[in-house]
Image (spheres, rainbow, N blue to C red):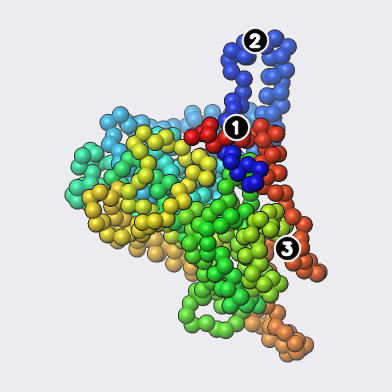
Amino acid sequence: MSATSDKKIVINKRLKGLPREALEKLSQTELIDKIVQLEAYNFQLRNLLQKKLTEQDKNDEEYAILFGKEAEDKVSKDKKVPSKAQKQRKFDWSSAHRRHVLLKITYFGWDYQGFACQEDSNDTIESNLFRALTRTCLIESRATSNYHRCGRTDKEVSAFCQVISIDLRSKHPPETQLDPSALISEIDYCGLLNRVLPKNIQCVAWMPLRSPVYSARFDCVSRSYRYYFPKGDLDISAMQEACRLLVRHADFRNFCKMDVHNGVTNYMRNLQSARVQACEENQSKTGYDMYYLEIQANAFLWHQIRCIMAVLLLVGQRKEQPNVISHLLDVDSNPCKPQYTPAIGLPLNLFRCDFRDKTTRSISHPSNEDANEEAMDTATEGTQPSDAPACSEERDLTSWIYSEENLQKLIENTQCEWTQFSVKSTMIRNVLQQLENLLEDNFKPKEKVQAQVILLQDSVKPRQYQPLLERKRCESLENRIDHFVKKQRLIVKDETETA
């Protein structure tokens, strides 16, 4: 950022509507015009929601009012019918104890619209999670739960180790919550949640925390993702060589989808490790062998891993040389990202998260889960895995608490998932063997068909490949900043003003 290197870019948090005093000064005609404008906007939103929401979403009471009188009548009729849920006494939160914990969540995201809650869909991991938390009376509401998430995964992306920090209802008063007897007799958080969560979203473990402001987001020092892919016709050695060039503290603006309108203008990230490795030791030496890319960093940019994987696939297909990584990381020579499509999100998995022993946040620190992504800590010193044994009373972390019964149930559920997909995979593999034998017997082709990785490249296959560095470029970061400053979405401030 040459033009704004000594400036700080922040989101313009202006009021989205006129204050009451300004509205009182408007004339009757101006107020009517404003009401007509708002009604037209609401009509557009209603139509948009009707197209995007699923039938299950539309049946929810919170959305029913948006879809006309018929839906309202349906809800009112449902309310007249007494149910067990309505007869239940409302939970008294005034006398409830709370404790601050980490929850480790695992989920398969291919049936969901991403992790974070969305206004136009209930079909997200977070929506299901908060429905389960409120249904089991572990929290009163999201707003009062002191909630932070370690990361937000996109549509179809899965996680083995998504971690959230949250205040949950406890059987014990704060002064005794860390006693061994209190931990043994505490509410079975995982078992309780898993009974009401979908089988492909499950709670693995919980950890009591000593600090009430410890954050799964701001106190996470590294995140590791894995991207699974078949070998196909890929040159694995070339991909491994390219991975070694990725490991550095650098500007990754050419390996992400820029999120400038949300105030993200710093694209420096510390990529701690990157490797391509076989999933199993015993390989069949065919294009059907499975590999994974594992990347560890302090924090990630929007679509960063999917963009990295897209470039690595081109390297593996010998369309690009491994040193294209160095060229794209040289933002002085290549300030504008070449146009290419990120790899699909389905094979991506948030595999591991590591946390610092003691939070860097103060008790008075504001709890803001929607803060700018740049607020993520970049320090990596003193990184210690979260499952390491407690070595000092000064640590905010304790140890993960597992339940044998819960783990056995999780394994059973996951084995059922494995059986379902493994049977499908085996059936498809047998069909492929027959088709490949037919092709070999009838036509004797010079080369085998190895198109296993085409699905991962979510783009149209061109007749003639155009090298990345020769492609049409996206807009520069500076131009995007200028655009949103003119739109009054961003404000440029001097560093002296913010000091």
Q: Name the image quarter holding residue 264.
A: top right
Measured in 3D between alpha carbons, the distance from the residue under mark 2 to the one under mark 1, in whole angstroms, is 25 Å
Measured in 3D between alpha carbons, the distance from the residue under mark 1 to the one under mark 3, in whole angstroms, is 35 Å
Q: Nearer the viewer, residue 5 or 369?
A: 5
Nearer mark to the viewer, of 2 and 1: 1
Please name the amino acid that badge 2 sits on.
Lys
Q: How many marks?
A: 3
From the top left corner, tell me how far across and down residue 167 is, in percent.
35, 40
Badge 3 is on which residue? 469
Badge 1 is on which residue? 12
For mark 3, give the secondary structure: helix
From the top left corner, tell me how far across and down residue 39 is, in percent.
69, 24
Please name the amino acid that badge 3 sits on.
Leu
Q: Nearer the viewer, residue 179 or 72?
A: 179
Whether residue 416 can be seen here: yes
Badge 2 is on which residue? 25
Q: Nearer the viewer, residue 298 or 386?
A: 298
Q: Nearer the viewer, residue 218 or 64?
A: 218
For mark 1, give the secondary structure: loop
Tell me which residue sits at (69%, 29%) in the image: 41
Q: Name the image quarter holding residue 255.
A: bottom right
Nearer mark to the viewer, of 1 and 3: 3
Whether residue 452 can be seen here: no
